Amino acid sequence: MSVIGPPRTIRIGSRKSQLALIQTYWVQKQLEMHFPGREFEVQTMSTHGDKILDVALSKIGDKGLFTKELELGMLGNEIDFAVHSLKDLPTNLPENLVLGVVTERENPADALVVHAKHQDKQLETLPEGAVIGTSSLRRLAQLRHHFPHLTFKDIRGNLNTRLAKLDAGEYDAIILAVAGLKRLDMEDRIHQVISSEVSLHAVGQGALGIECRADDTEVLELLKAIEHIPTTQRCYAERAFLRELEGGCQVPIGVDTHIEGNTLTLTGIVASIDGQRLVQDTVSGEAISAEQLGLELAQRLRQAGAQEILEEIFAQIQRG
Ligand code: DPM
């Protein structure tokens, strides 16, 4: 005889930042709508990345900066799944954890946000020496390539902190993801959406990735309700590309993907930090073979010179 009790409460792990909570509550609400009889509760945790706000991101070699504590929570059975900005989730996950689902992507592009005195300017018309705030080597390398007359300066902190630093005049403009600004209801701060000709976005940008225990079939089944297949295919191609190039989150690697019918097109770029060398190419194929396409593109770029650029960057990072 087996006793069937009430279904277990599902515990969702989240970082404490405003953006992380908005994303997590969105996932919670979607699941509550799909499964009215079930309980989903949110538990917040501080991650290493939240605690070291004064160190430049690019100087921290730790790939799981924003995910490790949540992963320990899942492995220790304190939470059942974690909601991440997919771009912050390393491409190699700890044993026994998996990327359960990917939800529908927001606009994955980057945005230029300017100081009030530059309201009439675009990226193309900012004056010589204008100071651009970013801690992303990807943004830095690509923008330097196209706009060598601009100056780049590290910026840290959450979105509100960054915007306050911009408004206080520490920077002439800053670069932020369109998706984050939209989710925080700050779309009005987007001054210019940066085109993919100027800067390719980060792997997984704009999508949420939900990580859970590999053997938790019940959670995996529930999560399927909020999966978005085209986003999943695009992000699997992007992540396979990044994994194959062995890039952590902080190397100048950018991507762009599209799906039309059953065809997935993936463009990728590897740039040197000084913006002098860019290696870029595009592959297309069956969307169901997304990861294969990512691998193929990585191999092509490697042969076209990306390997040299990456080795240089890894050596640079190791020297500190
Ligand atoms: C990663 C990068 C940044 C974040 C590097 C990159 C930006 C760091 C910076 C991997 N994670 O993009 O090349 O500019 O100093 C992050 C943001 C979001 C998730 C903020 C942003 C929101 C967008 C999303 C930080 N992680 O990119 O402006 O959910 O995709």
Image: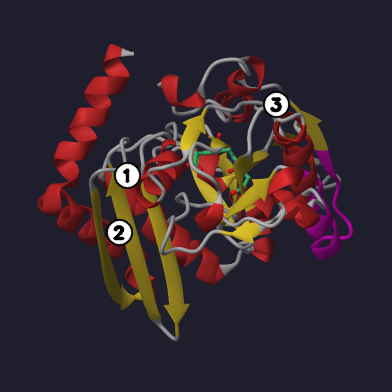
Q: Is residue 129 left or right of residue 146?
A: right
Pick whichever, 231 or 140, lies toward us. 140
Task: Please report whichever mark, 3 or 1, sits nearer to the chain's N-terminal start.
Answer: 3
Which residue is identified by label 2?
Answer: 294
Disc number placed over residue 243 in the picture, else none: 1
Residue 172 visible in image = yes
User: Considering the numbered disc 1 on the image, is that residue within a helix, a strand or a loop?
Assistant: helix
Query: Farthest residue toward the front?
Result: 128
Mark 3 or mark 1: which is in front? Answer: 1
**Mark 3 neighbour density, 10 Å: few (under 14) some (14–19) many (20 or more):** some
Pick whichever, 137 or 209, lies toward us. 137
Which residue is identified by label 3?
Answer: 78
Task: Please report whichever mark, 2 or 3, sits nearer to the chain's N-terminal start.
Answer: 3
Mark 2 to mark 3: distance in Å? 34 Å
Residue under the point 24% across and 60% down: 297
The type of residue carrying mark 2 is Gly
Mark 2 or mark 3: which is in front? Answer: 2
Residue under the point 28% across and 16% down: 318
Q: Position of residue 286 (x, y in %)?
A: 33, 77
Find residue 237 and report its image quarter. Answer: bottom left
Task: Please report whichever mark, 2 or 1, sits nearer to the chain's N-terminal start.
Answer: 1
Task: Quarter of the image for the C terminus: give it.
Answer: top left
Disc number placed over residue 169 in the picture, else none: none
Q: Position of residue 118 (x, y in %)?
A: 68, 48
Residue 2 visible in image = no
Q: Is residue 22 left or right of residue 256?
A: right
Asked whether the beta carbons under mark 2 and mark 1 sit within 8 Å of each other, the answer is yes
Magenta stretch encompasses residue 35: yes
Chain part drawn in magenta: 24-41
Q: Quadrant of ligand 1?
A: top right
User: Considering the numbered disc 2 on the image, is that residue within a helix, a strand or a loop?
Assistant: helix
Q: Measured along the vertical axis of the image, is residue 271 above or below residue 266?
A: above
